[in-house]
Amino acid sequence: MSKIAFLFPGQGAQHVGMGRTIVEKCPAAKQLFDQAGEILGYDLAKLCFEGPAEELDSTVISQPALFVTSLAALEMLRAERPDVVLGCEMTAGLSLGEYTALVFSGALTFEDGLKVVQRRGEAMQAAADKVPSGMVSALLLDRPQVEEVCQEASDAGRIFIANYLCPGNTVISGENAACEKAVELITAKGGKPIPLAVAGAFHTEIMKPADEQLAEALAGVPLKKPEIPLVSNVDAASHEEPDSIRSLLVRQVVSPVLWENSIRAMLDAGVTEFYEIGPGKVLKGLLKRINRKVPCETVNDS
Protein backbone atom coordinates (compact mmCIF):
# COMPACT_ATOMS: atom_id res chain seq x y z
CA MET A 1 0.00 0.00 0.00
CA SER A 2 1.32 3.44 -0.92
CA LYS A 3 2.29 6.05 1.67
CA ILE A 4 2.00 9.64 0.44
CA ALA A 5 4.08 12.66 1.50
CA PHE A 6 3.70 16.30 0.46
CA LEU A 7 6.72 18.55 -0.21
CA PHE A 8 6.56 22.36 -0.39
CA PRO A 9 9.15 24.50 -2.24
CA GLY A 10 11.28 27.31 -0.87
CA GLN A 11 12.58 30.66 -2.06
CA GLY A 12 13.92 30.59 -5.60
CA ALA A 13 10.95 28.67 -7.05
CA GLN A 14 8.97 31.87 -7.70
CA HIS A 15 8.25 33.09 -11.23
CA VAL A 16 6.00 35.71 -12.78
CA GLY A 17 2.64 34.21 -13.66
CA MET A 18 2.58 31.69 -10.85
CA GLY A 19 -0.84 30.99 -9.38
CA ARG A 20 -2.85 32.63 -12.19
CA THR A 21 -4.21 29.39 -13.69
CA ILE A 22 -4.82 27.93 -10.23
CA VAL A 23 -6.97 30.92 -9.24
CA GLU A 24 -8.93 30.67 -12.50
CA LYS A 25 -9.68 26.99 -11.78
CA CYS A 26 -10.24 27.09 -8.03
CA PRO A 27 -12.43 29.56 -6.08
CA ALA A 28 -10.81 28.52 -2.76
CA ALA A 29 -7.40 29.48 -4.18
CA LYS A 30 -8.71 32.92 -5.20
CA GLN A 31 -10.05 33.38 -1.69
CA LEU A 32 -6.57 32.74 -0.27
CA PHE A 33 -5.02 35.42 -2.50
CA ASP A 34 -7.80 37.88 -1.60
CA GLN A 35 -7.28 37.20 2.11
CA ALA A 36 -3.50 37.51 1.70
CA GLY A 37 -3.87 40.94 0.07
CA GLU A 38 -5.86 42.16 3.06
CA ILE A 39 -3.34 40.80 5.57
CA LEU A 40 -0.23 42.05 3.74
CA GLY A 41 -1.60 45.42 2.69
CA TYR A 42 -0.70 45.06 -0.99
CA ASP A 43 -1.98 43.19 -4.06
CA LEU A 44 -0.01 39.94 -3.83
CA ALA A 45 -2.01 38.33 -6.65
CA LYS A 46 -1.04 41.10 -9.08
CA LEU A 47 2.66 40.71 -8.20
CA CYS A 48 2.51 36.94 -8.64
CA PHE A 49 0.54 37.05 -11.88
CA GLU A 50 2.12 40.11 -13.54
CA GLY A 51 5.39 40.90 -11.73
CA PRO A 52 7.67 42.76 -12.22
CA ALA A 53 10.18 39.95 -11.65
CA GLU A 54 12.59 42.21 -9.75
CA GLU A 55 9.93 42.90 -7.13
CA LEU A 56 8.64 39.33 -6.96
CA ASP A 57 12.20 38.04 -6.51
CA SER A 58 12.89 40.27 -3.49
CA THR A 59 12.98 38.37 -0.20
CA VAL A 60 10.20 40.43 1.38
CA ILE A 61 7.80 39.60 -1.49
CA SER A 62 8.92 36.15 -2.66
CA GLN A 63 8.47 34.49 0.73
CA PRO A 64 4.78 35.45 1.21
CA ALA A 65 4.21 34.88 -2.53
CA LEU A 66 5.49 31.29 -2.46
CA PHE A 67 3.69 30.55 0.80
CA VAL A 68 0.32 31.66 -0.59
CA THR A 69 0.79 30.20 -4.09
CA SER A 70 1.76 26.80 -2.68
CA LEU A 71 -1.30 26.74 -0.42
CA ALA A 72 -3.43 27.78 -3.41
CA ALA A 73 -2.04 24.79 -5.33
CA LEU A 74 -2.95 22.63 -2.33
CA GLU A 75 -6.54 23.92 -2.49
CA MET A 76 -6.68 23.04 -6.19
CA LEU A 77 -5.50 19.51 -5.41
CA ARG A 78 -8.02 19.28 -2.56
CA ALA A 79 -10.83 20.25 -4.94
CA GLU A 80 -9.75 17.95 -7.78
CA ARG A 81 -8.37 14.94 -5.87
CA PRO A 82 -9.51 15.08 -2.24
CA ASP A 83 -8.52 11.44 -1.69
CA VAL A 84 -4.84 12.33 -2.26
CA VAL A 85 -4.94 15.13 0.32
CA LEU A 86 -6.77 12.97 2.85
CA GLY A 87 -4.28 10.15 2.20
CA CYS A 88 -1.15 12.21 2.89
CA GLU A 89 0.73 10.83 5.90
CA MET A 90 3.90 12.98 6.10
CA THR A 91 5.10 16.42 5.02
CA ALA A 92 8.14 18.68 4.77
CA GLY A 93 9.07 21.99 3.20
CA LEU A 94 12.38 23.41 2.01
CA SER A 95 13.29 26.42 4.18
CA LEU A 96 10.33 28.80 3.69
CA GLY A 97 8.30 25.77 2.57
CA GLU A 98 8.39 24.47 6.12
CA TYR A 99 5.83 27.16 7.03
CA THR A 100 3.56 25.99 4.22
CA ALA A 101 3.90 22.45 5.54
CA LEU A 102 2.98 23.66 9.03
CA VAL A 103 -0.26 25.17 7.75
CA PHE A 104 -1.09 22.00 5.80
CA SER A 105 -0.41 19.86 8.89
CA GLY A 106 -2.81 21.93 11.00
CA ALA A 107 -0.10 23.27 13.31
CA LEU A 108 -0.47 26.87 12.13
CA THR A 109 -3.37 28.89 10.69
CA PHE A 110 -3.08 30.50 7.26
CA GLU A 111 -3.42 34.01 8.70
CA ASP A 112 -0.82 33.51 11.46
CA GLY A 113 1.49 31.71 9.07
CA LEU A 114 1.37 34.52 6.52
CA LYS A 115 2.05 37.17 9.16
CA VAL A 116 5.09 35.25 10.43
CA VAL A 117 6.37 34.64 6.89
CA GLN A 118 6.05 38.36 6.16
CA ARG A 119 8.11 39.18 9.28
CA ARG A 120 10.61 36.45 8.38
CA GLY A 121 11.15 37.89 4.90
CA GLU A 122 11.58 41.42 6.25
CA ALA A 123 14.02 40.26 8.95
CA MET A 124 16.12 38.20 6.55
CA GLN A 125 16.25 41.05 4.03
CA ALA A 126 17.35 43.46 6.77
CA ALA A 127 20.10 41.07 7.92
CA ALA A 128 21.26 40.64 4.32
CA ASP A 129 21.36 44.42 3.79
CA LYS A 130 23.82 44.76 6.68
CA VAL A 131 26.34 42.28 5.23
CA PRO A 132 26.86 42.03 1.45
CA SER A 133 26.56 38.28 0.99
CA GLY A 134 25.11 35.54 -1.17
CA MET A 135 24.79 31.84 -1.95
CA VAL A 136 26.42 29.49 -4.46
CA SER A 137 25.37 25.98 -5.49
CA ALA A 138 28.33 23.62 -5.70
CA LEU A 139 27.39 20.95 -8.24
CA LEU A 140 29.27 17.71 -8.98
CA LEU A 141 31.28 17.76 -5.74
CA ASP A 142 30.86 15.50 -2.72
CA ARG A 143 30.42 16.84 0.82
CA PRO A 144 34.10 16.60 1.87
CA GLN A 145 35.11 18.57 -1.23
CA VAL A 146 32.55 21.30 -0.45
CA GLU A 147 33.81 21.44 3.13
CA GLU A 148 37.32 21.98 1.73
CA VAL A 149 36.01 24.80 -0.46
CA CYS A 150 34.51 26.55 2.56
CA GLN A 151 37.68 26.11 4.59
CA GLU A 152 39.89 27.49 1.82
CA ALA A 153 37.53 30.34 0.90
CA SER A 154 37.19 31.45 4.54
CA ASP A 155 40.40 33.47 4.12
CA ALA A 156 38.30 35.94 2.14
CA GLY A 157 35.39 36.10 4.62
CA ARG A 158 32.80 34.07 6.48
CA ILE A 159 31.38 31.18 4.46
CA PHE A 160 29.42 28.07 5.43
CA ILE A 161 27.46 25.13 4.04
CA ALA A 162 23.81 26.23 3.99
CA ASN A 163 21.86 23.46 2.21
CA TYR A 164 22.55 19.74 1.89
CA LEU A 165 20.14 19.23 -1.01
CA CYS A 166 21.10 15.92 -2.64
CA PRO A 167 24.20 14.02 -3.76
CA GLY A 168 26.27 16.37 -5.91
CA ASN A 169 24.30 19.50 -4.98
CA THR A 170 25.36 21.40 -1.88
CA VAL A 171 24.73 25.11 -1.35
CA ILE A 172 27.19 27.39 0.43
CA SER A 173 26.47 30.84 1.88
CA GLY A 174 28.83 33.61 2.81
CA GLU A 175 30.17 37.11 2.41
CA ASN A 176 30.53 38.19 -1.20
CA ALA A 177 34.34 38.02 -1.35
CA ALA A 178 34.30 34.50 0.10
CA CYS A 179 31.61 33.42 -2.37
CA GLU A 180 33.69 34.75 -5.27
CA LYS A 181 36.70 32.77 -4.07
CA ALA A 182 34.48 29.69 -3.60
CA VAL A 183 33.37 29.91 -7.24
CA GLU A 184 37.02 29.69 -8.32
CA LEU A 185 37.72 26.80 -5.94
CA ILE A 186 34.66 24.81 -7.01
CA THR A 187 35.73 25.09 -10.63
CA ALA A 188 39.32 24.11 -9.79
CA LYS A 189 38.07 20.97 -8.05
CA GLY A 190 36.07 19.89 -11.11
CA GLY A 191 32.72 21.13 -9.88
CA LYS A 192 30.17 23.51 -11.38
CA PRO A 193 29.43 26.67 -9.38
CA ILE A 194 26.05 28.38 -9.79
CA PRO A 195 25.63 31.71 -7.93
CA LEU A 196 22.04 31.98 -6.71
CA ALA A 197 19.76 35.01 -7.13
CA VAL A 198 19.17 35.60 -3.42
CA ALA A 199 19.63 38.61 -1.17
CA GLY A 200 22.11 37.16 1.31
CA ALA A 201 23.77 34.29 3.13
CA PHE A 202 20.69 32.45 4.32
CA HIS A 203 20.93 29.61 6.84
CA THR A 204 24.19 30.87 8.38
CA GLU A 205 25.25 32.97 11.36
CA ILE A 206 25.20 36.01 9.04
CA MET A 207 21.40 35.91 9.44
CA LYS A 208 21.79 36.16 13.21
CA PRO A 209 19.71 39.35 13.73
CA ALA A 210 16.84 37.77 11.78
CA ASP A 211 16.43 34.78 14.10
CA GLU A 212 15.85 37.08 17.08
CA GLN A 213 13.14 39.01 15.23
CA LEU A 214 11.56 35.75 14.09
CA ALA A 215 11.55 34.49 17.69
CA GLU A 216 9.56 37.59 18.67
CA ALA A 217 7.08 37.03 15.85
CA LEU A 218 6.62 33.35 16.71
CA ALA A 219 6.25 34.01 20.43
CA GLY A 220 2.83 35.55 19.88
CA VAL A 221 1.54 32.89 17.48
CA PRO A 222 -0.44 29.83 18.63
CA LEU A 223 1.04 26.54 17.42
CA LYS A 224 -0.71 23.19 17.63
CA LYS A 225 0.57 19.64 17.44
CA PRO A 226 0.77 18.70 13.72
CA GLU A 227 -1.91 16.27 12.59
CA ILE A 228 0.67 14.32 10.56
CA PRO A 229 4.47 14.02 11.04
CA LEU A 230 6.33 17.07 9.74
CA VAL A 231 10.07 16.63 9.16
CA SER A 232 12.21 19.57 10.31
CA ASN A 233 14.92 21.14 8.15
CA VAL A 234 17.21 21.51 11.16
CA ASP A 235 17.55 17.88 12.28
CA ALA A 236 15.60 15.82 9.69
CA ALA A 237 13.29 14.52 12.41
CA SER A 238 9.59 15.05 13.16
CA HIS A 239 8.47 16.88 16.29
CA GLU A 240 5.08 17.08 17.97
CA GLU A 241 5.50 19.64 20.75
CA PRO A 242 4.68 23.23 19.70
CA ASP A 243 7.54 24.66 21.78
CA SER A 244 10.03 22.38 20.02
CA ILE A 245 8.65 23.34 16.62
CA ARG A 246 8.86 27.04 17.49
CA SER A 247 12.48 26.68 18.62
CA LEU A 248 13.43 24.77 15.46
CA LEU A 249 11.86 27.42 13.21
CA VAL A 250 14.05 30.05 14.88
CA ARG A 251 17.16 27.86 14.54
CA GLN A 252 16.35 27.16 10.90
CA VAL A 253 17.26 30.73 9.86
CA VAL A 254 20.88 30.27 10.98
CA SER A 255 21.27 26.49 10.50
CA PRO A 256 21.96 24.39 7.41
CA VAL A 257 18.94 22.81 5.71
CA LEU A 258 19.25 19.02 5.88
CA TRP A 259 17.03 18.32 2.88
CA GLU A 260 18.67 15.11 1.69
CA ASN A 261 18.55 13.72 5.24
CA SER A 262 14.89 14.77 5.52
CA ILE A 263 13.94 12.91 2.33
CA ARG A 264 15.86 9.82 3.44
CA ALA A 265 14.08 9.95 6.81
CA MET A 266 10.71 10.00 5.01
CA LEU A 267 11.75 7.09 2.80
CA ASP A 268 12.88 5.17 5.90
CA ALA A 269 9.44 5.86 7.41
CA GLY A 270 7.85 4.07 4.46
CA VAL A 271 6.93 6.92 2.07
CA THR A 272 6.42 5.50 -1.42
CA GLU A 273 4.98 8.49 -3.28
CA PHE A 274 5.68 12.24 -3.15
CA TYR A 275 3.77 15.30 -4.34
CA GLU A 276 5.59 18.61 -4.84
CA ILE A 277 2.95 21.26 -4.22
CA GLY A 278 3.72 24.78 -5.42
CA PRO A 279 5.73 26.57 -8.10
CA GLY A 280 8.51 24.81 -10.00
CA LYS A 281 9.90 21.28 -10.03
CA VAL A 282 13.08 21.75 -7.98
CA LEU A 283 12.15 19.28 -5.25
CA LYS A 284 11.19 16.61 -7.79
CA GLY A 285 14.62 17.01 -9.36
CA LEU A 286 16.37 16.69 -6.00
CA LEU A 287 14.36 13.57 -5.19
CA LYS A 288 15.54 11.93 -8.42
CA ARG A 289 19.14 12.44 -7.29
CA ILE A 290 18.36 10.86 -3.90
CA ASN A 291 16.17 7.96 -5.10
CA ARG A 292 15.21 7.64 -8.75
CA LYS A 293 12.66 4.89 -8.14
CA VAL A 294 10.23 6.87 -5.97
CA PRO A 295 7.61 8.80 -7.99
CA CYS A 296 6.93 12.50 -7.44
CA GLU A 297 4.00 14.36 -9.00
CA THR A 298 4.06 18.15 -9.25
CA VAL A 299 0.98 20.22 -8.42
CA ASN A 300 1.21 23.71 -9.88
CA ASP A 301 0.09 25.80 -12.88
CA SER A 302 1.50 23.47 -15.53
Image (cartoon, rainbow, N blue to C red):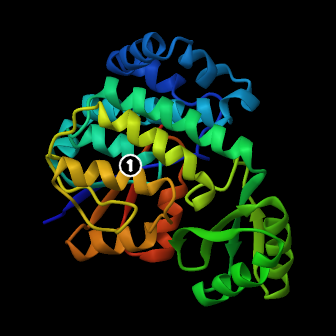
Q: Is residue 298 above or below residue 37?
A: below
Relative horizontal placement of residue 181, taking residue 173 as reference (left or right): right
Q: Nearer the viewer, residue 197 or 78?
A: 197
Query: At x 54% / y 18%, what residue is drawn?
Result: 45
Tell me where residue 106 sits by quadrant: top left
The quarter of the rendered structure image containing the N terminus is bottom left
Query: At x 60% / y 32%, what residue is drawn?
Result: 60
Q: Secondary structure at mark 1?
A: helix
Query: At x 16% / y 52%, what residue is drawn?
Result: 241
Relative horizontal placement of residue 116, taking residue 123 as reference (left or right): left
Query: At x 30% / y 48%, what residue is drawn?
Result: 246
Q: Nearer the viewer, residue 41 or 127?
A: 127
The mark total stands at: 1
Q: Give the amino acid type for the residue marked by disc 1 in the picture.
A: Glu
> Which residue in the structure is indicated by mark 1?
98
- Residue 76 location in percent, x, y? 34, 30
| Crowd band around label 1 with a 10 angstrom C-alpha radius: few (<14), some (14–19), many (20+) | many
Residue 206 appears anywhere in the view:
yes
- Residue 250 location in percent, x, y? 40, 50
